Amino acid sequence: MRFAVVLSAVALVTLSAGCDAVVSGQAVPAPVKSSSAAGVRGPASLEFREVVANASRVGGAGTGPPPSQAARQSTGVAEQTAAVRAIDCMPGRADPLAGHDDRTLPLVTCGQTDDTAYLLEPEFLPGSEVADATSGYDTQRGQWIVYLEFKSEGTKIWADFTSKNVNQQVAIVVNSQVIWAPNIRVAVLDGNTQITGKFTEQRAQELASQLSGR
């Protein structure tokens, strides 16, 4: 789940792991888009949270009894560490907290489609600030990309966050689980964001749908 966020500033700047860089000011062919959700709001359960560096655990089975909701949203370091170790992140498991987390508190949770346990900071950007989410094929780079746009206030918040957190992970959370946790490669000042991750067409469309609420 750890792939690059490909970011767009005033002129397109692309820095993607495992790909050639498209440098600011160069002409970039328009991608062929396959699905659109223009003008939609993100789903009510969508939220953006900062990933606490070096606090993740890879491996589905936790140790000990499942942590309580209070433990998963504790502000204490010891409780957070214990919750990350204990939470069951085996694929296909149900999350009793799904969609009911307190967004003002930290959150220990799992990747929706992998076996990673995450410790996340409180929400810094709500899904209601998503203006548009689409998927498309970039013919120049030969890969599927998810395009994410924010509304006016969301653009300001996203610009501030990405400027301060280059090379850090950001968690895209739906129903209290991480659907994608990309790395921020450059600051995004205009709200137009490209997310890469060696997507298949189906996965790119799924992620765009999750971001748009369609």
Image (cartoon, rainbow, N blue to C red):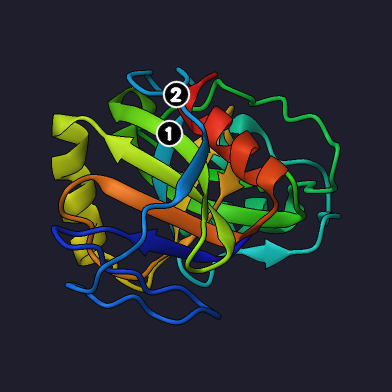
Badge 1 local density, few (<14 within 10 Å), some, or many (20+)?
Answer: many
Quarter where residue 189 is shown: bottom left
Q: Secondary structure at mark 1?
A: strand
Give the image quarter of residue 156: top left
Q: In the visual, does 15 lie left or right of 129?
A: right
x, y percent for residue 90: 85, 48
Q: Is residue 141 above or below residue 146?
A: below
Residue 64 x/y as whole percent: 83, 51
Query: Can the viewer see residue 163 in this picture?
Result: yes
Relative height, residue 83 to residue 48 (above, below): below
Residue 75 visible within the image:
no
**Residue situated in front as seen by the camera: 126 or 67:** 126
Q: Amino acid at mark 2?
A: Ala
**Where's the C terminus, which quadrant?**
top right
Q: Earlier in the sequence, mark 1 or mark 2?
A: 2
Q: Position of residue 95 (x, y in %)?
A: 73, 30
Question: Are dots 1 and 2 in contact, CB under 8 Å?
Answer: yes
- Say which residue appears at 57% left-offset and 65% top-offset: 142
Quarter of the picture containing the N terminus is: bottom right
Please give the name of the residue rendered at 23% of the width and 45% of the height, measured from the top-left corner: 191
Residue in the image at 46% along x and 54% along y:
195
Q: Residues within 10 Å of mark 2 (few under 14, many from 20)?
A: some
SS at mark 2? loop
Task: Tell me if 92 is positioned left or right of 57 in this view.
Answer: right
Q: Is residue 167 left or right of residue 191?
A: right
Task: Identify residue for label 2.
Answer: 37
Residue 155, percent from left and from top: 18, 41
- The residue labelled by disc 1 is 133
The amino acid beneath tag 1 is Ala
Nearer to me, 168 or 63: 168
